[in-house]
Amino acid sequence: MSQSHTGRRRPFTAPNSAKGNSKRHRDALRLQQHSTGHRSVHDIRVGLSTSSVYPMTVRECFDVAGRLGYDGVEVMITNNEETQDPELMRLLSRSSGLPVMAIHAPTLLFLPRVMHRDHWEKLRLTAQLAKDVGAETVVLHPPFRWQGDYARRFVPGVREIAQEIGVALAVENMYPWRAGIREVLVYSPDWDNTHQDYDDVTFDFSHASTAGVNALDAARTLFPRLRHVHLTDGSGSLTDEHLVPGRGRMPVAETLQYLARHDWSGDVVVEVNTRFVRKRSTRDAMLAESLAFARTHLGLDAG
């Protein structure tokens, strides 16, 4: 679904194919054999995103990650000042022994003015924040089609800022918005990052589920540029669910096994939705289950 290079205006909607695609992908996976005995020759870290403990603070995310045995933290920038404070992050990292593995740029629709009103400057500030706290990766969403120059020059502009600041900008896969039997194509150049000329990419299983994407095929296609994985799950519904991995219908285990078997060298960060969980013990159990799932299927507990 890449943008046309023929000069024709790209359509704003397309047929809704996610539900049918999801079923076909699940049926195909039943015929495959899988093993958890492989481990990458590279050290794959498993981190915890601050979005997994939202609306808790960055301090609390470091505490949870440390208690449960995670390898580090990804900080999603919001209007909470802690998510924009490099001195605090360095302090928490030193005291906990956990690195800031990645910074997630404030590119969500409801964060238009966080850090800066100008999209390019916002991205540059995010990249500088990542460098200041020792994070090697910035996760960011593709722009919306109505975001002017930022949308038109997004691919080369991302590359320029990555080279300027010296951190990887890993563009995340998204999904089409739904309007009845049609899909609304709001992202530019596309929600699908498999066909775009990005140097580095992030893959999110929940987004792939909502889009009806075959996660295993996407991982194979993205592999040379795949720097970062958001570990979660989805049932193939129209909503972005961010389920605990293994509780949905995506080939999450098979995809992690594929990455381990082919000596992948990126980071995995758990990004699951716990915001409606009332008990701390229940939330901790969900995050511990997610970590155990990752370690098992990446072969990190083998041998």
Image: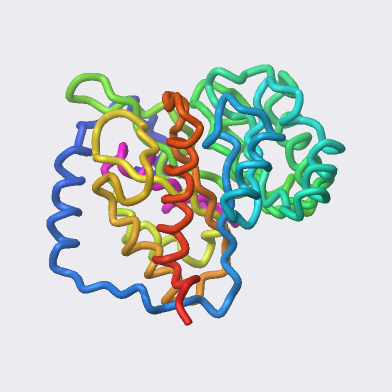
Q: Is residue 144 above or below residue 40?
A: above
Q: Is residue 211 above or below residue 95?
A: above
Pick whichever, 162 or 83, lies toward us: 83
Q: Residue 261, located in which quarter of the rendered image?
A: bottom left
Pick whichever, 17 or 278, lies toward us: 278
Give the left or right position of residue 255, taking residue 193 as reference. Answer: left
Percent position of residue 285, x then y: 44, 43
Percent position of residue 139, x then y: 60, 44
Percent position of residue 107, x then y: 59, 29
Percent position of residue 176, x then y: 34, 32
**Quadrant location of the N terminus?**
top left
Pick whichever, 233 or 141, lies toward us: 233
Q: Is residue 45 above or below residue 77?
A: below
Residue 157 visible? The answer is no
Q: Which residues are magenta?
A: 194-212
Q: Is residue 208 magenta?
A: yes
Picture residue at 54% right of the left edge, 37% below the top: 141
Pick whichever, 278 or 217, lies toward us: 278
Residue 181 visible? The answer is yes
Picture residue at 55% right of the left edge, 28% below the top: 54
Q: Is residue 162 magenta?
A: no
Give the left or right position of residue 22, taking residue 202 as reference. Answer: left
Q: Residue 175, located in which quarter of the rendered image?
A: top left
Q: How is the image coloured?
A: rainbow
Picture residue at 34% right of the left edge, 61% below the top: 253
Q: Number of callouts in the render? A: 0
